[in-house]
Amino acid sequence: MQELKQRADIHDTLNEILNISLMKIPLNDQMDKILRVVLKINWLSLEQKGCIFLADESGVKLKMVAHHNLGESLLSLCSQIDFGQCLCGIAAQQQKLIFRSCVDADHHIVPDGMEPHGHYNMPIVLDGKTLGVLNLYVKHGHQPSKLEQDFLRACSMTMASIIERKKIEERLHTLSYTDELTGISNRRQFMNHLDEIIIESEKRKRMFSLLFIDLDYFKAVNDRYGHDYGDKLLIRVTQRIQQCLRDTDIVARLGGDEFVLILEGISSEDTAQQIAEKLITTISKPYSIDELTLEIGASIGISSFPLHGTHAEGLLRKADHALYAAKESRGKAVISSEYHARASA
C-alpha cells in the first residue's frame, strides 16, 4: 500500500514538472519551481532543503540557480563550484548519482554550524554532457531505496529535456535578434530599441541622435579578396565602432556594410557630429588581417529626435538622406538639416 502511494506521488510530481516546463518563464524560475515540487515529497526523508546547479558555458563549473532553506554561509560558499569539487561537483564530473547518509570527507565545503545530514546528488545529463545537478538534503542516517533512486533518475531525465529545450529557445531568440556575423543587434532588434527609446525620450523630453554608417570602398575589398576577408573586416569594424561608444549607445548592423547607431542623451547636433567624425577617423585606420593590410573609409548621415522627426521610419529616412549627401564626397558626416538646407538653396 505504501509503495502504491509513493508511485502515485512520483506520477503526480513528474506531471507537475512537465506542467512547469510549459510555463513561459525564465529557466532559473522553472528550476526553482521544480525544486519546490520535489521537496514536497516527504517520504524521501528530505530536510526540506536543496538546490539546483546548472553548468556554465565552460562546462567545468556549476552555478547555483535555485535553492530552498539554505543558510547564507553555504549560499556564499557554494554559489559556484568546480566539477569534482564537493559532492555536487563529483556527481557532475562522474555523471552518476552520488548518495551519502552523513557528512564525510567528500564534503569539501563545510560552512559554519553545519548540522549532520545526508545527500542525494543527482547529475542532470543529456547526450553525455552534464547540464546540472539536483542536490537534495536527507536526514542523517537515511537509507536509500531503489524507488527513490529511480524517481530521481526520472526527474533528471525530465529536467535535462527542459533545460535543453529552453537553451534551444534562447539560441533561436538570440539568432532572431542578433546579427550572426558580428554578434550585435540586427535590424529587427534595432527597430525595437528605437521604438522604445522614442517613447522614453518623448516622456523625458530629451534628445537622441541616429547615425547611419556606410563603409566606403568595402565592396572593392570584398570583390578583390573574397568574402572571408570581407567578413573578418566587418567584425573588426564592429569592434572599432563599439570602442568609440558609451554603454548606453546602441549599434546594429542592418545588412551588408551598413551600420546604424543610437546616441542617447546627447546635448546637441554638434556633439553627434563630433562623435560621427571620431567614428570615421577610427574606422578609416588600416586593418591588418592575416597577411594583408586593408584600407576602407566611412560616411555617416545623422538625424536627431525630435528635430528631424518623432517616428522611427522618419528618423531613419532622414539619416539615410543625409548619408546619401555624405557619400557624394565620401568620408564625411552630414547632419540631415545641413543636407536639406543645401538642397533648398
Image (cartoon, helix red, strand yellow):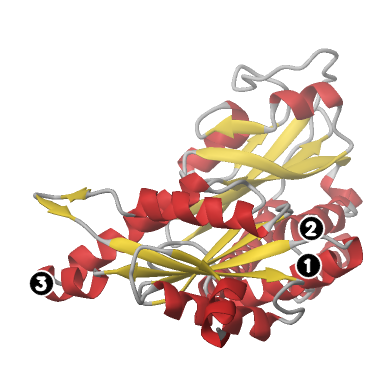
307 w.r.t. 144: above or below: below
- In the picture, measured across the screen, residue 211 lies left or right of residue 225, that is right
Residue on which disc 3 sits: 224
Is the C-beta separation of discs 3 and 1 under 8 Å? no
- Amino acid type, callout 2: Asp
Secondary structure found at label 2: helix
Secondary structure found at label 3: helix
Judge by depth and name the residue closer to the eye, 251 or 3.
251
Q: Position of residue 88 (x, y in %)?
A: 61, 36
Q: Earlier in the sequence, mark 3 or mark 1?
A: 1
328 w.r.t. 262: above or below: below
- In the picture, measured across the screen, residue 102 lies left or right of residue 84, that is right
Residue on which disc 1 sits: 25
Q: Is residue 168 visible?
A: no
Judge by depth and name the residue closer to the eye, 104 or 29.
29
Q: Position of residue 259 (x, y in %)?
A: 46, 69
Label 3: few (<14), some or many (≥20) within 10 Å? few
Residue most toward the front?
345
- Amino acid type, callout 1: Ile
